[in-house]
Amino acid sequence: MRWIITLALAAVLGACGDDDETRDGGRDAATPRDSGRTDAAPPRDSAASDAAAPDASFPPSMFTPLTVRPAPVGGGFVSTTHIVPLPADPSRFLVFDAASGTVTRWACAAAGCSDEETLLEDRTLAPVTGTIVDFDDDGDDDVLVAGIGPNFGGLPGDVGAVELLRAGAGTWTRERLLDETNRAVCAEPGDLDGDGDLDVVVCEFGQTTGRLSWLENTPGGMMQHVLHDRTGTSHVRPVDVDDDGDLDLMVLISQLEENVLLYRNDGTGSFGIETVFDYAETYAGLSDLESVDYDGDGDTDFVLVNGDGVDGLPPGVSPADVHGVAVLENDGAGVFTHHDLIRNWGSYTARPGDVDLDGDVDLVVVNDQDDAMYSGERLPAMWLENLGGFSVRRHPIPEAPIRAEALGVGDVDGDGDLDILTGRLFVAPSMPGIPLVLLRNELR
């Protein structure tokens, strides 16, 4: 299982250039097709459940905070951006930090956490997200890195990159997979063409122009296939949504439009496009998309989060009525129904996991709540207890740092329950920094 924390702004990894030899014009553009399914948005369960009152069987707070890394002094453009617990050992995790240009490995024990190793240090790449994967099938965990580049503020220009950090005998070798990206924010592995090796899907958030593409792993290097040029492409999840044996792509877009698209794979790396969900409001602030079998029926559903308030809201519109967490329920054939779980101001990132150890999937959510935007209840984080039937009970986590958009979940202290790692997506010079914090689950 790969623990992945992906945020709306992120991307780092090398590149192989945009020349004609690396672009295959025959399969670049995905085209709509008649698959017997409608391209219209699916049914929507529009009434978000009123979260049940907190359950007295749980303590008011189940988490004890531990500062892993102090808050940065004097701010900076980016603090902690992305946190990934190691699949084989969740007591160790990677931190991707675009401000320092580093990817570091940390280890935690009963006495605290320490920085073990720096895998990468390059401020021109500004690594913002990454994925742990044995890319070359040699038994070692490599790291895919998406680098947003020095252009974090969003000025025009293709300055990011995607790289692979290949693990060796105590060393890491950098390999450029894609260069000159427009604010790349994700790099996800998967065998998209069914040839037995791993390809890479890349999101470029862009500013006025963005891009979704996949890099075909060939004997001569990576060949780029462009699927679309829409700005705001921030998340992609390679998943077999229709159980036909190949990987499809669920894609989150949030900038000039707010929607979720499905690129349905025919098994060869050619895709048809379908709209899974389309927000009528362009200010919805979509911020996260996670894959998990939420309802336990054997197929892959998706958790959808919206609460990015950077673009603001129209006068008279409350973020408490717009922001929240939802589930896109899969019927097993890749047709989805939208279920609102909760309306919640500033919901930003969610991670699934069995927080209360009762055998189902709960959700941990961190909230980006800017009190200059709204004066309502301020809650830095919460976990949503799964009550079944797409109903949830909200449990506040007041110990979490304010505005901690980065989130990781895993059994960091090895006691059999899920702990939480939190940090910040970015810190502007005018904003106070926040620390990297471990929230120890005290159920065990």
Image (cartoon, rainbow, N blue to C red):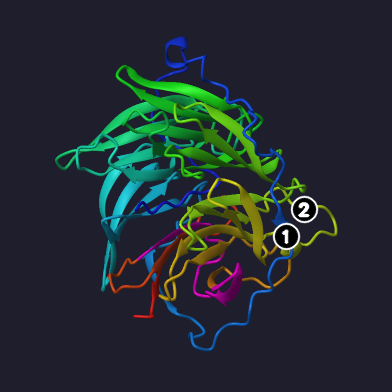
For residue 373, the mark is 1
- Please give left or right for residue 314 compared with residue 61 in the image: right
- Considering the numbered disc 1 on the image, is that residue within a helix, a strand or a loop? loop
- Please give left or right for residue 106 compared with residue 128 in the image: left
Kind of residue at badge 1:
Met
Residue 388: in magenta span: yes
The spot of residue 361 in percent (x, y) is 47, 66
Q: Residue extending furthest bottom?
A: 56
Viewer-proximal residue among 66 and 408: 408
- Considering the numbered disc 2 on the image, is that residue within a helix, a strand or a loop? loop
Alpha carbons under labels 2 and 1: distance apart = 9 Å
Q: Do the residues under discs 2 and 1 have CB atoms within 8 angstroms?
A: yes
Q: Quadrant of residue 65?
A: bottom left
Residue 228: in magenta span: no
For residue 313, the mark is 2
Residue 166 seen in render: yes
Q: Residue extending furthest front?
A: 36
The spot of residue 191 in percent (x, y) is 38, 34
Residue 204 seen in render: no
The spot of residue 349 in percent (x, y) is 54, 57
Q: Quadrant of the C terminus?
A: bottom left
Viewer-proximal residue among 61 and 227: 227
Residue depicted at x 58% and y 26%: 30
Give the vertical position of 91 relative to 230 (above or below). below
Magenta residues, start to end: 387-410
Give the vertical position of 142 relative to 220 (above or below). below
Residue depicted at x 37% and y 51%: 95
Q: Quadrant of residue 208?
A: top right
Q: Residue extending furthest top?
A: 20
